Image (spheres, grey):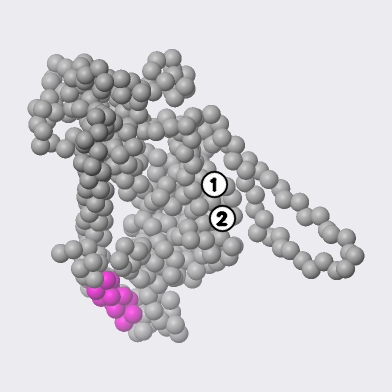
Amino acid sequence: MNSNQMREKRAALVDQMNGLVTVATTEGRGLTAEENSTFDSIDQDVRGLKADIDRLERSEDLKREMATKSEAVAERKEVAKVEGRSVYSKFLRHGASALNSEERSMLAEMRGTATQIAGTDSLGGYTIPEDFSNALDIATLFKGDVEGLSQVINTAGGATLPYPKVDDTSVSGSILAESASMAVSDQTFGVLNLGAYNYTSGMVKVSHQLLQDSAFNLDAYLAESLGNRIARAQNAHFTSGSGSSQPQGFITGGTSGLTAASATAVTAQEVLELIHSVDKSYRNSASFAIMANDNTVAALRKLGVGSSNDYPIFTPGLNGSPDRIFGVPVHVNNDMADISTGSKSIAAGDFSKYVVRNAGGIQMLRLDERYADTLTTAFLAYRRSDGGVLNSAAIKYITQA
């Protein structure tokens, strides 16, 4: 079954769920215990299909990318230049001692410097080559939606980056009468200072047997393991980081659009009110979206609009597009809070007004001696990033009672 067939199957299941809600709403009642059980059972299948679809499409994307890169490498085989990725892969599998002089020279060019690690005089790790780094970025972006939706700035160094910010949505132009003087309407600029916090994956240990096994795809294994670890840590901070000794999350930098009437539920009307609490200039952005965790999205699927205008607020995405709530793309972010007393459970906004700053490339270290007695080699990666909200009015959230 391909991804399109799986999406069609998922859409059919969502229609069954919506049918249960429609019948109950038409009859002016809530879901019965049996209907709730059926709804939740179908919902588990829908979630499972969503995960299967994402994995399948991710695998297909990686295959296409690796096939494209393999073709490009094959075309350059006649050139007597040592390829960066092959040198890097050889270093990962066999260590620096297995490299010849030309390969060592190329690897030395990838070596980090003291300026890449603040407060450290020693050299850093080896910068991952572009084609390898792209695989790691795929794993990083796949795990959390915040960086995928945000405005990303890549810089060579990690010095503080002042980024100007301004909200001019309340000011408009006017007609100027003949010979009339023009009124002055100054913009008030602020500044978002973006630093570079050092995120590490922690160590991944690989046995010498696996390193010696040519059938073992070491590059893909490290990309998956190290990339996902860094992504999880960053996504948590990009969501709700305090901004002190860590990035500012969009929840911290955003503002409350409304307070829900209940501590344990939200209504369709409250979701609509949240969407329209954001200025229309931000709602018109291609990056305008709703974000909530998986449990909250499941709760939103059960909501109906009302007997006078009865239709489900949730529509499944097809052909790679995201699911939608009231026509707005919805992204699952499990670092957001559940619906509970005082929590900020649902956010809506223009996520291009959240800026992620990445300093330098992704660095990797190979530790040959640390676990030599157990015949294993350790690997770790690190990445320097920061993030913050440019305009608090661009991203708003529901606060539970």
Residue ID at (28%, 75%): 15
What type is the residue that disc 1 sits on? Val
Residue to which mark 2 is pinned: 394
Residue ID at (71%, 60%): 171
Circles 2 and 1 in contact, beta carbons < 8 Å: yes
- In the image shown, does 196 or 220 lie closer to the viewer? 220
Direction from residue 10 to residue 388 in the image, left or right: right
Rendering coords of residue 243 (x, y %): 52, 38
Q: Main secondary structure of the magenta part?
A: helix
Label 1's element? strand
Residue 114 seen in the figure: yes
Residue ID at (47%, 66%): 271
Residue 24 seen in the figure: no
Residue to which mark 1 is pinned: 389
Residue 287, above or below 156: below
Rendering coords of residue 101 (x, y %): 25, 17
Residue 17, above or below 122: below
- In the image shown, does 338 or 364 lie closer to the viewer? 364
- In the image shown, does 24 or 386 lie closer to the viewer? 386
Residue ID at (18%, 19%): 98
Rendering coords of residue 339 (x, y %): 41, 56
Residue 261, above or below 223: below
Alpha-carbon span between mark 2 and mark 1: 9 Å
State which region is magenta.
10-24
